[in-house]
Image (spheres, rainbow, N blue to C red):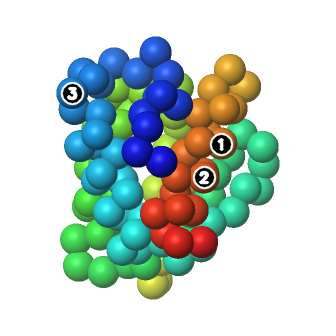
Amino acid sequence: MSDLAWVPQSCTLPTEERPLRVAEWDGLFSERLASLSRPEPLRLRLDLADGPGVEEKVRDLVERESGCCSFFTFAVTPGEDLIGLDITVDQEHAAVLEALAARTAAAGQW
């Protein structure tokens, strides 16, 4: 999924920076994804294996992503061994969440 055509026009991240940001998310998912679920059509639930600096990395990525893609709502929930990451969107951006779920599953090799 190297094609970034699924990134919506409402994303304000400069085009040349998008592949770098996607690579950051892909790296996190490939290294830390423990589970993935869709509890609701407009919500993606990820559990990430915790470790040194992981929560800070997740929070940093979430903050930067919120700055350019305001249609995402993120909730980070630290646990004993896992960090929960809930990602929700409005109906208008359902296809973006679907593409993100597919990309996350591929990066995490689900």
Say which residue appears at 42% left-offset and 27% top-offset: 69
Residue 102 is tagged as 2
SS at badge 3: helix
Say which residue appears at 46% left-offset and 63% top-offset: 107
Q: Say which of 21 and 3 sits in front.
A: 3
Q: In which quarter of the image is the C terminus?
A: bottom right
Alpha carbon of mark 1 to alpha carbon of mark 2: how far?
6 Å
Residue farthest to the right, as pictured: 40
Say which residue appears at 71% left-offset and 39% top-offset: 42
How dense is the environment of label 2, judged by Cα within 10 Å: few (below 14), some, or many (20 and up)?
Answer: some
Residue 79 in view in this figure: no
Q: What amino acid type is highlighted by mark number 1?
A: Glu
Residue 38 in view in this figure: yes
Q: What amino acid type is highlighted by mark number 3?
A: Glu
Residue 108 is tagged as none
Q: Mark 3 points at which residue?
A: 16
Residue 50 to residue 15: above or below: below
Alpha carbon of mark 1 to alpha carbon of mark 3: how far?
23 Å
Left or right of 47? Residue 58 is: left
Q: What amino acid type is highlighted by mark number 2?
A: Ala
How dense is the environment of label 3, judged by Cα within 10 Å: few (below 14), some, or many (20 and up)?
Answer: few
How dense is the environment of label 1, judged by Cα within 10 Å: few (below 14), some, or many (20 and up)?
Answer: some
Alpha carbon of mark 3 to alpha carbon of mark 2: how far?
22 Å
Left or right of 28? Residue 94 is: right
Q: Name the residue under label 1.
A: 98
Label 1–label 2 contact, CB within 8 A: yes
